Every structure is written in C-alpha cells, then in structure tokens.
Image (cartoon, grey):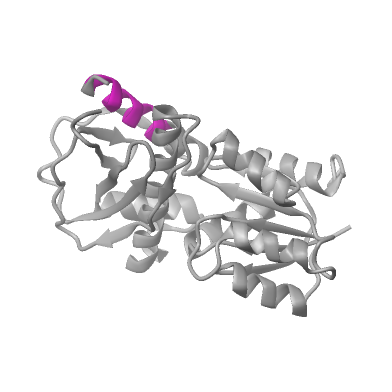
Amino acid sequence: MPVSELEQMLCDSTAEVLETMFFTSVMGDAVDASSETPWISARLSFDGRPSGRFGVRVPLQSGRKIAADFLGLEADAVSDSQIGEVVGELCNMVCGSVLSRLEKDCRFDLSHPEIEAPDATAPDYAARRLLELEDGTLDVWLELPKAL
Amino acid sequence: MAYNVLIVDDSPAMRSFMRRVLEMSGLTIGACLEAGNGQEALDRLRADWVDIVLTDLNMPTMDGEQFVRCMEADAALRSIPVLVVSTDRTEGRVQQMLELGAKGYLSKPFLPETLREEIEKVLGVSNASE
C-alpha cells in the first residue's frame, strides 16, 4: 500500500476519534512543531495481519488540553498522570480505527499503550502525519513490516 | 426508573469519560460502579446489583471475553445485560461476543447519544428519560 494512503488513514482516523470523543478537530497538517516542547508520547504494538507498532506524540500543553476536553475538566485541574492516561486512550482508539481501515475483517490484538517521558522522540515509521489541532499539534505514526 | 450501571475498563480516564457521558445522556442513572478488570467486576456484581454492565475487552488480569463467559456460567449473574464497548470493530469479534452472551456491542469512538441508544436497546426501553 502506498505510504500516502497510509498517511491519509492516519489523518482520517485521528479526525474521527478527536471529533467524536475528544470534542476537538483536526485543522490540517502542522508545518513545524519543533519549538513546542516537552512532548508526551504513547505507543503500542499490535498483532494480526499485519503486525506492527503505532504511536501518538503531543506537546505536553496540547496533551493537557486534550485530556481536559476528554475528562470534562479545566486544563489546570488535569494532573500529569491523567494526561498520560488520556494520551494512552487516544493512542488506543486511533490505532483501532486505523487497523479497521487497513484490514477490516482481520482481528488484531493490541498491547496496552506505554506512556513515555516528555521529550520522547518519534521512532522510525512507515507512515506519519503531523497534524494541527484546534489547540496544538499531534504527531501520529504507524510502523509496519516493509513487505506491506 | 434509575438504572444502576457497572463500568468495566482498565483505563481510569475511560471510566471517567463513560461516567460523564452517562450523566449527559439523559438516562436516569442511580449507582455508577466501576471496576478495572473482569475479576474486579465479578466481585462487584456479587456484592451489588446493577441493571447493566458496560465492559471493555482488552484488560489485564481478566479480559472482557473471559468476564462475559464467567457471567454466563453464573446463574446469579447471567440475567444482567452486558454491553461491550471496545476499539475492536471487526465483524468476527462482534459476532463472537454476541454469541457468548453480550446483549450489545458498541465500537469506539462513539458519540454520546449512540451510547444512550445502545443502552436503551440493551435494556429494552426507549426514550427512557422522556
């Protein structure tokens, strides 16, 4: 499958999940997020046909806003652990959406999302989209076997 | 009528979200209990009666599939309706859980009103808050 198709799936799935359950939207592609630090990252692995890894990465301030929207709290009332839980849940849901678009009849087993420390870097990936949200940036990536 | 609900999910954030959506749904909710996995949920159900269980599938200790199997095997619990709420939306998985005894299946992401509709369907009521 062409990388461009995978990247479109990442975008479509992220938009679906954010608009449905996080009450925010994808505005388009982000141009440059290098100045936004620190970042928080969640990644998981999935087993099926194909197997691979999936992750999301957000600047901590964007993660705080996403968590606040999800939990129905004010941003300054959200703890760091809640940000991690919500970013993990976002990772889980976007991955489920991507996989259902990739292979809708194949069952996948997803590992629990692992939260990584701020300033985590994005790994090597097969497809990646850096998206601009209403309040920040979201980096989404998918790692698949090269044969796909 | 107020409905007692048990939310089973290993993510505290997801349990908070579900509780919030239930509060916004217009359904009259009585007790809203929580459990972090299937085993905790079984322990809660043996102590407290609920009208419906909302359960995730992918959980540590006891996953949602095993939890539903245990409920079906327990004469005291099998009459409590279960709505599965999961990111897994494959047709085979949905069919499997319904055959095991779940009364409904809702895939994430979902709109708040869809959760209400599914709960009403599982409970066999309509426009419960009206």
Residue A31 as seen in the image, left or right of residue B33: left
| Side (left or right) of B66 relative to A134 | right
Magenta: main secondary structure equals helix
In the depicted structure, whether residue B68 falls above or below residue A101: below
Give the quarter of the figure containing the C terminus of chain A.
top left
Residue B9, above or below B112: below
Question: Relative to residue B123, is residue B116 drawn left or right?
Answer: left
**Residue B20 is covered by the magenta coloring:** no
- For this rendering, which residue is in front, A99 or A108? A108
- Which residue lies at the image location 60% right of the left edge and 55% below the top edge? B18
Q: Residue at x 43, y 28 (%)?
A: A101
Q: Position of residue A63 (x, y in %)?
A: 32, 52
Quadrant location, the N terminus of chain A: top left
Asked if residue B69 can be seen in this view, the reply is: yes
Residue A77: name its quadrant: bottom left
Give the extent of the magenta segment.
A4-15
Camera-side residue: A11 or B94? B94
